[in-house]
Amino acid sequence: MAKQEIDDRFKKFGTVSFTAISKVNEFISFLEKGKVMATKCKKCGMSFFPPRADCCDCLSSDMDWVEVTGDGTLLTFSKLQYGPVGFEGDLPYIIALAQYKDVKVFGRMSKELPDSDIKIGMKVKALPVKHSNGQISYEFKKA
Ligand SMILES: [Zn+2]
């Protein structure tokens, strides 16, 4: 009888993960190595975050991993007072969108940063964080 191997690295992602099986499991392995990664289509050059295994623009599956490095620019943010099931314990928290070169990254602002310090246009770094329950994700910190 063949035992089916399930690649479930994605279940370690986030507070509660809803996507245990993903073609982009490498994302988690990169986070564990301290890197936040996006994918970039080798054919048309389109970048994706969260990383995608297939390009929605030209339908190619020939993707490269590219690290989200340096300082991003905060484009917008929003404070959540209500969250999806599983995230209630984290509320309130701030979700944000930042521009890094040719890719937009969506994530949470670090709770270490006071609300009054968060301004559109500020420079932010996307950095992996390990939660006390063993889950891993990334968040924005002031650059
Ligand atoms: Zn493409």
Image (cartoon, helix red, strand yellow):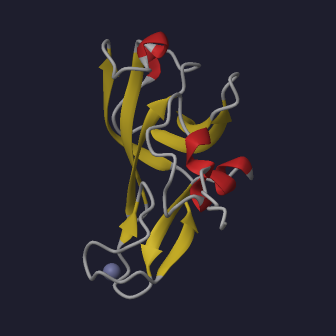
Q: Residue furthest right?
A: 33
Q: Front-most of 15 and 48?
A: 15
Q: How many discs mark residues in the rendered view?
A: 0
Give above or below for 65 relative to 79: below
Give above or below for 110 relative to 126: above
Q: Residue furthest left?
A: 57
**Percent x, y for residue 36?**
59, 53
Is 126 on the left or on the right of 44, as rendered? right
Q: Residue furthest bottom?
A: 43
**Percent x, y for residue 133?**
68, 23
The quadrant of the picture occupied by the N terminus is bottom right
**Percent x, y for residue 68?**
54, 57
The quadrant of the picture occupied by the C terminus is top right
Q: Residue at x 74, y 53 (%)?
A: 33
Q: Residue at x 44, y 70 (%)?
A: 53
Residue 109 appearing in the image: yes
Q: Front-most of 112 and 83?
A: 83
Residue 80: quarter of image = top left
Of the four image quadrants, the one with ligand 1 is bottom left
Q: Residue at x 41, y 81 (%)?
A: 61
Residue 69 appearing in the image: no
**Percent x, y for residue 79?**
33, 19
Is 136 on the left or on the right of 57, as rendered? right
Q: Residue at x 27, y 82 (%)?
A: 58
Residue 25: quarter of image = bottom right
